[in-house]
Image (tube, rainbow, N blue to C red):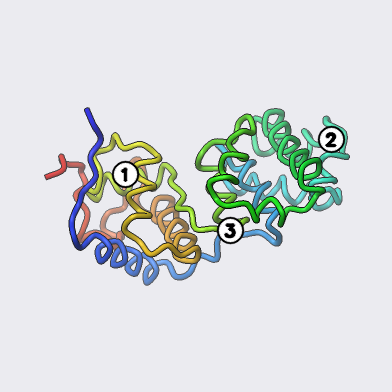
Amino acid sequence: MTARLIAGDRLRELLLDVFNRLLHHFGPRHWWPAETPFEVVVGAILTQQVAWRNVEKAIANLKEAGCLSPKGILAVPEEELWAMIRPTRFYRQKAARLREFCRMVVEEFEGDLDALFALDAPVLRSRLLAINGIGEETADSIILYAAQQPVFVIDNYTKRITARLGWQDGNVSYAALQRWFTEHLPRETALYNEYHALIDALGHNICLKEKPRCTECPLGGLCRHPQTPLG
């Protein structure tokens, strides 16, 4: 069955209304929590399949060791890197992804992260996706939060919430849902940044996978949960 997304002339108004409700409820999220663009990259890679608190522990270890830079990651012995990022699970695979990213920055861009991030978003995305283990969500998180280019990030929270709102039927692909957002929202980095962070706040705190706290939801008047077919 072909996945379906709602259509209509007032989708921009609807999406901005939802954004404003979430912003009023949660306030600005100030996401991504990092001191430098490189720290954003490291966090995006390490946060795959693990809670953020574990990523914070790993980043703190890297900072303490003085190796939170592309050259620093490449210089540290492999087993020491494993030990520092061990809290994030799958640490050997993640260490390899970090090293491959850092090797690209150092060897192809002379260690200049700004030069990499100056690439047009589609080109940058293809370079990131070529790194083994970096998927669409991670690549887009790097582009949005580190390179600060307007790419809308889709994650499991986004899919869950849009399905419960009745915006899509639960079978939509990453690319289709991303395209739907970008076609109906102003193409603004700050908006995409805040919108994704607010969706994650809703999914993490209220619109839970099991036993969602619907009575606390700022989108209660719009929601169709439990899910019903698109009309």
Q: Residue drawn 15% across and 39% down?
A: 229
- Residue 51 % position (x, y): 56, 44
Residue identifier under label 3 = 32
- Residue 134 % position (x, y): 59, 36
Instruction: Classify 10 Å Cα crowding around label 2: few (below 14), some (14-19), many (20 and above).
Output: few
Relative vertical location of residue 120 with respect to residue 137 in this rendering, above or below: below
> Residue 80's mark?
2
Q: Residue drawn 78% across and 38% down?
A: 103
Residue identifier under label 1 = 211
Q: Classify mark 3: helix, strand or loop.
A: loop
Q: Amino acid at mark 1?
A: Lys
- Residue 149 % position (x, y): 55, 58
Whichever of labels 3 and 1 marks the residue nearer the N terminus, that label is: 3
Frontmost residue, 134 versus 104: 104
Question: Relative to residue 53, is residue 105 drawn left or right?
Answer: right
Whichever of labels 2 and 3 marks the residue nearer the N terminus, that label is: 3
Q: Amino acid at mark 3?
A: Trp
Which tag is nearer the camera, tag 2 or tag 3? 3
Relative vertical location of residue 109 with respect to residue 93 in this rendering, above or below: below
Question: Relative to residue 4, is residue 189 drawn left or right?
Answer: right
Q: Classify mark 2: helix, strand or loop.
A: helix
Whichever of labels 2 and 1 marks the residue nearer the N terminus, that label is: 2
